[in-house]
Amino acid sequence: MEGLNINSTSQDQSYDYNNITSNYFEPNVIHVVTYIVVAVGLPLTLVAIYALYSMVRSDHVAPIYLINLLISDLIQFCYMIVEVAPNVDWNIKIILFIYISALIASVYFMVCISLERYLVIAHPLWYRFRRTIKTSVVVCVLVWVLSAVCAVCVYFTDDTYILFTALLFLLPFPLLIFFLVGTLKALSATISVPSDEKRRIVGILVLVLLIYTLLFLPSIIWFLKEYTDGLVDFRLILLSLTFLRFSPLADLFLYVFMRKGFIDKLLASPYEK
């Protein structure tokens, strides 16, 4: 991630990612990955947002969280474009601030999606009478505001920013596990939700947990390792940042699971054999 400086807690120096990429990774490879992710993900994300917008009705709240998740992905795509653009003034901190806010928001919108799907199965009556578009919009606004506040805290916590960032990204992990386990336990007792809807809900919860585990946990390991050891592992940093580039692309699979049709047949096929 060019232009982003990381201060080691045990060394009085900063590390520029331009130097990291030139010494430990071929810059062209990182740029090629970025070009591919943006070229594929950006148009598909725009199409998905347009399609999901048509699904937002008074009786269908779930797409609101997914739309906001995809909007945060759009912001990340824009950052990637700026990142590979020549002659970018990285002294303009607002660029990185917006990216960090979008990254935090994307993680917590995944939590919102999992929570909403959990309530459909575990507390269907409560969810049926309490779900409203207004409530979902308020939650989304809170997520965006808190994400911006957390991004500011990341900038101004000095030496403790590493631990703060690690805890910030680690907090959703037990929540996502709880929602998945709670949903699986409640499945047998739920009769008001059709079987195809149950499979789709479980599929969404599993997919969210997989995206988080595979693409965000490496960054958490990086932060914790740097905080405990006081050393900067450049290879781990590059691996973590590369995984983060794929997170907006992976979120598009959530849109596939939200749509009825092909995915229902795919999820039902193991039960038909």
Image (cartoon, rainbow, N blue to C red):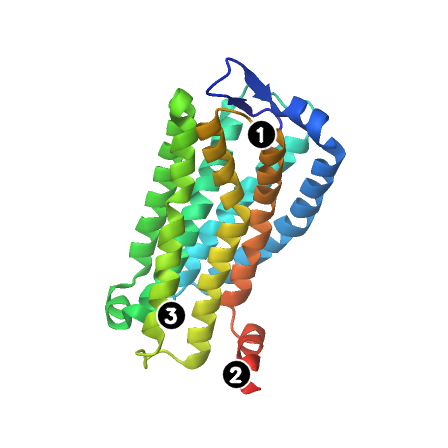
In terms of depth relative to the viewer, which is nearer, 263 or 221? Answer: 221
* Pointer 2 local density, CA inside 10 Å: few below 14, some 14–19, many at least 20: few
Which of marks 1 and 3 precedes in the sequence?
Answer: 3
Q: Position of residue 209 (x, y in %)?
A: 47, 56
Q: Which residue is mark 2?
A: 271
Asked whether residue 59 is in view, the answer is: no
Q: Which residue is mark 3?
A: 184
Q: CA distance from mark 1 to mark 2?
A: 46 Å
When the figure is inspected, residue 68 is found, relative to residue 205, above or below; the finding is above
Q: Position of residue 240 (x, y in %)?
A: 57, 39
Q: Position of residue 40 (x, y in %)?
A: 67, 51
Q: CA distance from mark 2 to mark 3?
A: 16 Å
Q: CA distance from mark 3 to mark 1?
A: 39 Å
Q: Secondary structure at mark 2?
A: helix
Which of marks 2 and 1 precedes in the sequence?
Answer: 1
Q: Which mark is residue 233?
A: 1
* Pointer 3 local density, CA inside 10 Å: few below 14, some 14–19, many at least 20: some
For the N terminus, which image quadrant?
top right
* Pointer 1 local density, CA inside 10 Å: few below 14, some 14–19, many at least 20: few
As drawn, which residue projects farthest toward the bottom? 273
Q: Secondary structure at mark 3?
A: helix
Classify residue 26 by image quadrant.
top right
Q: Amino acid at mark 3?
A: Leu
Q: Amino acid at mark 2?
A: Tyr
Asked whether residue 160 is in view, the answer is: yes
Q: Is residue 176 left or right of residue 253?
A: left
As drawn, which residue projects farthest toward the top? 12
Q: Position of residue 64 (x, y in %)?
A: 41, 57
Q: Is residue 241 left or right of residue 10?
A: right
For the C terminus, which image quadrant?
bottom right
